[in-house]
Amino acid sequence: MLESDVYKRMIESREKMSKSHKKIANYLIEHHETAPFLTASKLAKNVEVGEATVIRFAFFLNYKGYPDLQRHLQEALQRKMTSAEVLARTTDDENDTENVVSEVLSDDIQNLKETLNQVDPALFEKVVYEMIQAERIYIIAYRSASSIGGFLEFYLDLVLQNTEMIQQADGVSEHLLDISKNDLVIGLGFSRYTKRTVEALKYVKQRDAKTVVITDHLLSPLVPYGDYKIVATTEINSFIDSFAAPMSLASALITALTRSEHKKVEKRLQDLEGLWETFDVFYD
C-alpha cells in the first residue's frame, strides 16, 4: 500500500519539505489506515499545524487540493470501507461533541469552496440548457442521494411539469421504458455508490438519452455514463457524506433555469398561487 504513487510522492519529496510539511507526511504514513478519512481541519488538529498548511501540503505534492490528496490516500487502501469501518476510523474515545457544530460547518464551508473552484461555468450553462430543452427529465437517486433528488424533483416539476424521480428500485424498467434521445436523465451518486444507479445510467445511455451526473469524484463509476459531469466535494469527518455542496449545486441549477425561463416560470407561479389559495395550502 505504501508503494502507491501518493506515498512515493511524499517519500521522494521529503528533502524539499518544510518542517510542517514533514510533520504532515510523517503522520499520514504512520497512520495510513486512519488518516485518509480525516478532514483537513481534523488532520491539522492531530498534526498540530494550521489547516492552511495542510491545504498547501496537498498543492506541494501536485494535487488539486486536499480533497484530491485525500481521495488518493483512500484509493491506496485498495478497497471500500464499510460504514461501520469508516465510523471507527474517524472516531476515537477522546472525541467529544462540544466542537462538532463548528467542525462540521467548517468542513462544509471548505467543501463548498472546493466545489466552486472545480465547477466549469460553461458546462453548468450547458446542463441548464439541456434541462430546458428536455421533453422529460428523469432523476435517478437512491439511498441518501434521494434527499437531493427529491429536492430537484419538487422544484423542477413545479415549474416545468415534466420531472420525475425514480424512487422504487424495482420499478426502473417500467419508468424508463419509453425514454428517448429527447429526454434528460440526472444521476446522483456518492461513495459508496449503488449498483442500481450505475445500471440505470448505463441503460439510458444505450437508449441515447442525454445524461447529467452529479457525483463526488471523476473516478466515480457514474462518470463514464454522463454526457455532463459535475463534481461536488462531500468530505466530512464522519461515516456520512456532507451534502452541502451537491445541494447547493441543485439550488444553483434550479435558480439558473428559472432565470432563463423567467417569463414562463412567473406565469406558472402566478397560476399556482391561485391554486394554493383555493386549497388553503399555506398557514397565514
Image: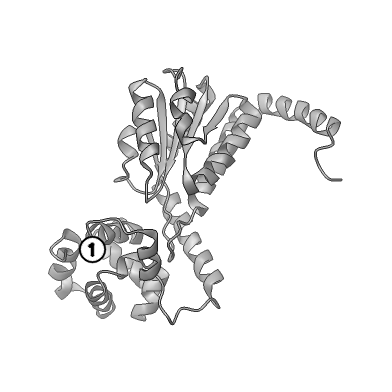
Q: Where is residue 17 in the image (x, y as percent from the top left)?
A: 21, 74
User: Count the marks: how many?
Assistant: 1
Which of the 4 image quadrants contains residue 273?
top right
Of residues 245 and 164, the one drawn nearer to the viewer in this rendering: 164
Instruction: Please report the residue visible at 61 percent of the width from the left and 26 percent of the height from the top.
Output: 160
Of residues 83 and 50, the one drawn nearer to the viewer in this rendering: 83
Instruction: Please report the residue visible at 65 percent of the width from the left and 31 percent of the height from the top.
Output: 158
Q: Residues within 10 Å of mark 1 (few under 14, many from 20)?
A: some
> Is residue 212 positioned above or below 183 on the image?
below
Q: Position of residue 58 (x, y in %)?
A: 29, 64
Q: Which residue type does callout 1 highlight?
A: Leu
Quarter containing the N terminus: bottom left
Q: Position of residue 216 (x, y in %)?
A: 38, 49
Find disc 1 in the rendering and name its residue: 61
Quarter containing the C terminus: top right
Direction from residue 28 to residue 165 in the image, left or right: right
Q: Where is residue 155 in the image (x, y as percent from the top left)?
A: 62, 36
